Image (cartoon, rainbow, N blue to C red):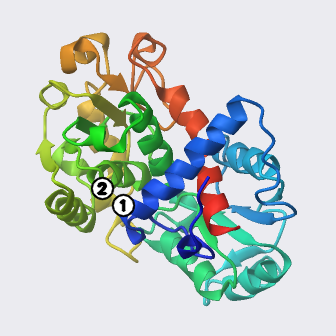
Amino acid sequence: MVVTEDLKGRDFLTMIEFTREEIETMLSVGIDLKRRFVTHEDHRHILPGRTLFMVFYNDSLRTRNSFEAGMTQLGGHAHFLEPGAIYTPALKGDEVAYSTERVSDVARVLSRMGDAISIRIYGGKCGWIYGKGHKIIRNFAHWSEKPVINMEDDIYHPCQGMADVMTIYEKCSHDFNKLQGKKFVMSWAYSAGQKPMAVPQTGVLAPSMFGMDVTLACPQEMDLHPDIIKKVEEHCDLFGGSFTIERDMKTAFEGADFVYPKSWGILDAHGIEGVRPAKPEIMPEIMNKYKNWKTTVELMDVTNKGRGYYMHCLPQDRAMEVDDEVADGKWSIIFDQAENRLHAQKGIMASIMH
C-alpha cells in the first residue's frame, strides 16, 4: 500500500479538488485495504489511536457504520456526534442561545482533541437553502487544524462518488483505463419525497473524471446545477469522455453499461444559492407528472446486450423508483456499492489522516 505525503492533512470536501491521479491513489489504497479485509489481514497499524469526530445533522445507516467500522479496522476510533445531543454547530448569525455553538469554536475544539472531523448536512437541516450545507462544511474546514471530510452536503457527496467509481472499476476488469468510453447513465427516478442534489451531481462528476460517456436523463424541471454541468463538460474535454442530456428514460438506457436511476428534487424549488425556496409545495405537483420514470426489467433489457449494471446509493424507494425484480436481480450491484463505502472511505482516511 502506497500513501503519498501529498495527500496527508488535506480536506476531502469534493472529488474535483483532487487530480485524477490523486483520486486513483486513494482508491488504490482502499482496494488494497479491501483485500486485507476479505483475507482477515490485520491492518490496525495504519491509523493506530487516531480519532475521527463525526457530526451528523442528518440520519445515516451506510455512512455512519462504514466510517465507524472503517476507523476500528484501521486501528482508530470514530465518535458519533448528534446535534441534538450537543450544542448544534451553527454559522455566525445563526446562533440560538443555549442550543447552538458557532462552527468556528466547535471546529477548533474538536481539531485539538482528535485527528479529523467529518460532517453530514443537507436538506431540511439547512432549510433547503441550496449551498448552505456545503458552506457549513467549508466553514468547518476553514477553522479546523485537522482534515475535514464531507459525508454529504446539499451539493456534493464525494464519499459516495468514490465508492461508485470503485464499484465500476471492479466491473471493468479492475482496470481504471477500461472505464474509458463506457456508457454511464445518471437518471432521475420518481419518488414521493424531496431529496437533495448531492448524489446525482457527484454521480455525473465522478465518471466524467475517468473518460466515461456520461448521460444525464431527467425531465427538464429536474436539471442539475449549471456549474456542475459545466464542470462535467470540462472533464470530458480533459479526459476524453462525452456528455449528453436525454429527456426520455428509455432512450437514455439504450446501450448503457451502467445505469444509476434515483430521485432528486427540483433546483428551482430549492432556489439559487443562499435563497430559501419560495414554494416548496410545488415539488409534488411537478414530480407527480413523471411517475412513469421507474426502472423496470423492460428498461434494463435495452441496456448493453441487456447486461447493463443497475446502481443506486441507497436507501431507495422500492416500488416507486425501481421494481424489486431489478433491485434484487442479476443487473443489481447496489450492495457492492454499499460495501465499497467502507473500503473507499478507508482509502480516504488512510491517505489524509496518516
Query: Which mark is in front, 2 or 1?
Result: 1
Q: Which amino acid type corresponds to the residue marked 1 in the rendered image?
A: Arg
Q: Position of residue 79 (x, y in %)?
A: 83, 60
> For the residue labelled by badge 1, is the local secondary structure a helix, a strand or a loop?
helix
Question: Which is nearer the eye, 314 or 16?
Answer: 16
**Above or below 253: residue 175:** below
Position of 244 with respect to 36 (left or right) is: left
Query: Which image quarter: residue 351?
Result: bottom right
Would residue 157 be visible to someone looking at this image?
no
One can see residue 179 in this view: yes
Residue at the image position 52 percent from the left and 69 percent from the top:
133
Q: Which comes before the other along the chain, label 2 or label 1? A: 1
Q: Quadrant of the C terminus?
A: bottom right
Q: Which residue is mark 1?
A: 20
**Residue type marked 2:** Met
Query: How many labels sit on residues?
Result: 2
* Left or right of 203 on screen, residue 145: right
Residue that extends furthest to the front in the rendered view of this protein: 2
Q: Residue at x 44, y 63 (%)?
A: 22
**Residue pictured at 37% horizontal, 25% vertical:** 310
* In the rendered image, the vertical position of residue 62 relative to residue 205, given as above or below: above
**Observer-nearest residue: 341 or 354?**
354
Residue in view at x 45 percent, y 65 percent: 14
Q: What residue does disc 2 label? A: 209
Q: Position of residue 41 (x, y in %)?
A: 77, 37
Q: Are marks 2 and 1 in contact (CB under 8 Å)?
A: yes
29 versus 87 height, above or below:
above
Q: Residues within 10 Å of mark 1 (few under 14, many from 20)?
A: some
